[in-house]
Amino acid sequence: MARTVEQMRHWHGPALLSYGFRPFFLGAALWAVIAMLLWVPMMTGGVTLPTAFDPVSWHAHAFLFGYLLAVVAGFLLTAVPNWTGRLPIVGWPLALLFALWIAGRAAVALSSYLPPFATALIDLAMPVALTAVIAREIIAGRNWRNLMVLGMLVLIMIGDAVFHWEAASGAYPAQGYGLRIGLGAGILMISVIGGRVVPSFTRNWLAKQNATTLPVPPMQRFDKIALLAMLVALTGWVAMPDARWVAALLAVAGVLHILRLARWAGRWTLAEPLIAVLHVAYAFVPLGAMALALEILIPGTAGRGTVQHLWMAGAIGLMTLAIMTRATLGHTGQPLTATGGTVMIYGALILAVVLRVFAGVWPGLATPFYWAAAVLWVTAFLGFAIHYGRLLLLSRSSASD
């Protein structure tokens, strides 16, 4: 068999299938727009999808196991070559993996026409295939340090499976074990991978500016303590989400991750939003942990769903958007700097998260806050699709013309 690197070199089909980040980043952004455009009228009763999930659970699944898995796929299929010196898939095998992801979105949306097992089987086909591909590359490349990342991908897949099981059993999966497993794995993934890339990218940029203050190198002893604290807190939250001792663990993890973020010299990066946004996105990790701790201790402060949006829309939404913009620029040969359009999409998403939280804090104004947050969310991801779509659809040489 031809080496996968040779397959990439000899690929003459659509540029969209020449690298993993291209179809999955574009697909993730478009799905973020489509799912939100469906969700708002579903919330008001104007649209009813033929899904077996209740509307809130469909909404949660669409973003956590639909959007997030697409971004994770694009990131891993792009990062693995740097980790192992190998390239997982390119061309039509990549198209097949992407098609499995699309099939999963369709199956969940139309699940009232399918047996629950068939819906789950179709939806889980993509994460199972992705896990097999990434496992093959990490093992073949003997890249043992990134087995942890593979483990977190497996946890997201398990969360998806549990979510389907809860839906089929008549439970409310939007606040079930499956969602907590998937969301916890997503936050842990940001804590681990973000803990590598945020200080590294910051150091590289500050060094070019001849700055005297540089971030602490990643994965020092303090980082490992903070990660262990977050792992313990998330494990407790998955198992016993209402326990007061879990609130204490979340609060401790939140404080440690605020201190961790402070060590990365983020205040010196405001001149380059492409770097600064990484720090803002990571800040939602401890903010979400401490807000969730407060909600456990004082139920009704903002509502469990509201504070979880600090993680789902804030940490996951903004960090993935930040990674998608930077990776797209870097891998298509563009300058690593944020244009006005990029700053706009960052700002729109940050404001969307703030307004979504306001909707929970001030329930009397919830409806206008919901609508405004939805419009800003769509603006951010449609802006990405428009602003970066050309780079994702064209070859590197064509995009640079």
Image (cartoon, rainbow, N blue to C red):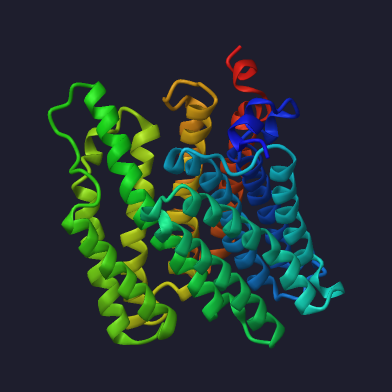
Left or right of 219: which side holds 134?
A: right
Q: Is residue 236 above or below residue 35?
A: below
- Which quadrant would the C terminus be assigned to in this image? top right
Left or right of 227: which side holds 150?
A: right
Residue depicted at x 62% and y 82%: 172
The answer to whether any part of residue 120 appears in the image is yes
The answer to whether any part of residue 298 appears in the image is no
Q: Is residue 148 above or below residue 386?
A: below
x and y percent of residue 27 in the render? 67, 45
Q: Quadrant of residue 42 in the image?
A: bottom right
x and y percent of residue 159 in the render? 55, 72
Residue depicted at x 38% and y 51%: 193
Residue depicted at x 27% and y 42%: 199
Q: Is residue 223 above or below residue 89?
A: below
Q: Quadrant of residue 127 in the image?
A: bottom right
x and y percent of residue 335 in the render? 45, 20
- In the foreground, 199 or 220: 220
- In the foreground, 81 or 231: 81
- Which quadrant would the N terminus be assigned to in this image? top right
